[in-house]
Image: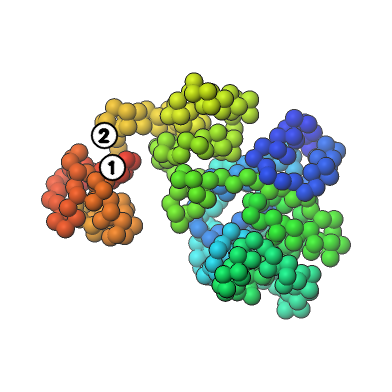
């Protein structure tokens, strides 16, 4: 007896909310409405230890499929991750080691469990099949594609036009991702819109192996807090593991123009409610600050519960609206306030960044700006150091 839920409203939301494209939409909707149990695939390369909200869009979509009774197949790319996907890269990326990938993969379970029911997830690693493939198998996959097809990809085309090097191994990535779909017999594969070439490669390779081509679902891009693509290297991200106060504070620092996108892509509020907020922002009956406070609350509640969201909201009001110090601050052991000290406590990533923070008035000691980076400042126990608008430290 099938345990698949057939609810047209829920299915329509799966197919539309936050979705950029579906191939083949009519085919996929027909299968969903027929109550067929589908194998829904997502691959994640463990190239970093923390998953950000851009990645979480796909995970929440998987949860929706899971709640309707479909089988989620999550592939940890411990093999593909060594090469790295070039889909969104403007230059050749360095290869990762197995040790790096394994260390990052071990960090994923707790994060995935915040969204998915892991007891019902089929969790695989693509080294299971890619690590066993011989050179003849690689040649067979490569024969399904042409160099022209690869060079017509936007990022490869741009690099080629700039006469920049493209590693031959970078052409192998879509072959490997496509073969993943064969190995786990995917009915549907999900991914970012920048992965469309790789997702389509899966359809081609499945046909070659006598399987019905998977349907494809791509998602809208979630921009980072500063309006650029969300990227760990740029520091404009919110991660699944960020603490409640950190999530709340980061949302309050974001650009106003992305408020409704964040409501739609990162919360579970109804589209009707989000539409009302969007209209209120347009006619200026709602202050963007108040909309962001609502967004910050909803996002924090989704991952940490209502109590934690309320506490984060009160802490934000205390520090940023009333000008008081945070209730709790990290304790640090430093002998002086210097460039090296700012790096040591994690307030800056380099001496250059620490110097800029001081020169621009972003470093305070007991509410007094410290701008002379050449002369280390004396500190004593209980002194409070503030770096930027959100980072506070108490000297032990």
Q: Quadrant of residue 178?
A: bottom right
Q: Quadrant of the N terminus?
A: top right
Q: Residue at x 77, y 49 (%)?
A: 23
Numbered mark located on residue 300 in the image: none
Image quarter for residue 327? Answer: top left
Q: Residue at x 73, y 77 (%)?
A: 134
Residue 206 in the image: state x and y as whole percent: 81, 61
Whole-percent x and y of residue 48? 50, 58
Secondary structure found at label 2:
loop
- The front one of 139 and 351 is 351
Camera sees residue 272: yes
**Which label sits on residue 392?**
1
Question: Is 157 positioned to the left or the right of 254 in the image?
Answer: right
Circle 1 Cα neighbour tier, 10 Å, few/some/many (<14 / 14–19 / ≥20): many
Q: In the image, is residue 26 above or below residue 356?
A: above
Q: Is residue 313 left or right of residue 229?
A: left
Find disc 2 in the rendering and name its residue.
325
Residue at 63%, 54% (x, y): give it: 194
Q: Tags 1 and 2 in contact by the CB under 8 Å rule?
A: yes
Q: Earlier in the sequence, mark 1 or mark 2?
A: 2
Residue 113 visible somewhere in the drawing: no
Q: Nearer the viewer, residue 149 or 37?
A: 149
Residue 358 image position (x, y, % from top left): 24, 51
Identify the residue at image location x=61%, y=62%: 155
Up the image or down, 99 lies above or below 36; here it is: below
Judged left or right of residue 292, residue 365 is left
């Amino acid at each position: 007896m099938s345990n698949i839920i057939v609810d047209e409203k829920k299915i329509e939301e799966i197919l539309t909310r936050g979705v950029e494209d579906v191939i083949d939409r009519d085919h996929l909707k027909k299968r969903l409405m027929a109550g067929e149990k589908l194998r829904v695939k997502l691959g994640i390369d463990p190239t970093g230890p923390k998953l950000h909200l851009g990645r979480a869009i796909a995970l929440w979509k998987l949860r929706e499929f899971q709640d309707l009774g479909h089988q989620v197949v999550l592939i940890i790319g411990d093999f593909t991750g060594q090469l790295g996907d070039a889909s969104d890269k403007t230059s050749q990326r360095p290869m990762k080691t197995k040790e790096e990938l394994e260390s990052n993969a071990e960090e994923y379970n707790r994060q995935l469990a915040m969204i998915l029911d892991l007891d019902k997830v089929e969790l695989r690693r693509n080294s299971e099949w890619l690590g066993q493939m011989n050179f003849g198998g690689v040649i067979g996959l490569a024969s399904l594609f042409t160099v022209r097809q690869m060079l017509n990809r936007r990022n490869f085309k741009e690099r080629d036009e700039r006469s920049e090097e493209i590693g031959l191994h970078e052409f192998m990535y879509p072959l490997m991702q496509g073969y993943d779909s064969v190995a786990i017999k995917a009915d549907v594969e999900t991914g970012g819109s920048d992965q469309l070439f790789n997702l389509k490669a899966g359809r081609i390779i499945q046909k070659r192996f006598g399987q019905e081509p998977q349907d494809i679902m791509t998602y809208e891009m979630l921009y980072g807090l500063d309006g650029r693509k969300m990227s760990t290297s740029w520091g404009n991200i919110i991660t699944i593991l960020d603490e409640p106060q950190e999530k709340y504070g980061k949302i309050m620092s974001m650009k106003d123009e992305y408020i409704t996108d964040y409501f739609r892509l990162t919360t579970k509020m109804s589209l009707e409610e989000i539409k009302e907020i969007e209209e209120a922002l347009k006619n200026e009956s709602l202050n963007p600050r108040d909309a962001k406070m609502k967004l910050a609350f909803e996002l924090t509640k989704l991952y940490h519960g209502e109590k934690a969201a309320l506490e984060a909201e009160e802490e934000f009001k205390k520090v940023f609206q009333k000008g008081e110090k945070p209730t709790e601050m990290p304790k640090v052991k430093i002998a002086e306030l210097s460039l090296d000290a700012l790096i040591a406590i994690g307030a800056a990533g380099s001496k250059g960044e620490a110097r800029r923070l001081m020169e621009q008035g972003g470093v305070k000691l007991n509410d007094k700006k410290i701008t002379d980076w050449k002369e280390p400042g004396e500190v004593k126990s209980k002194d409070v150091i503030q770096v930027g608008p959100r980072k506070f430290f108490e000297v032990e």
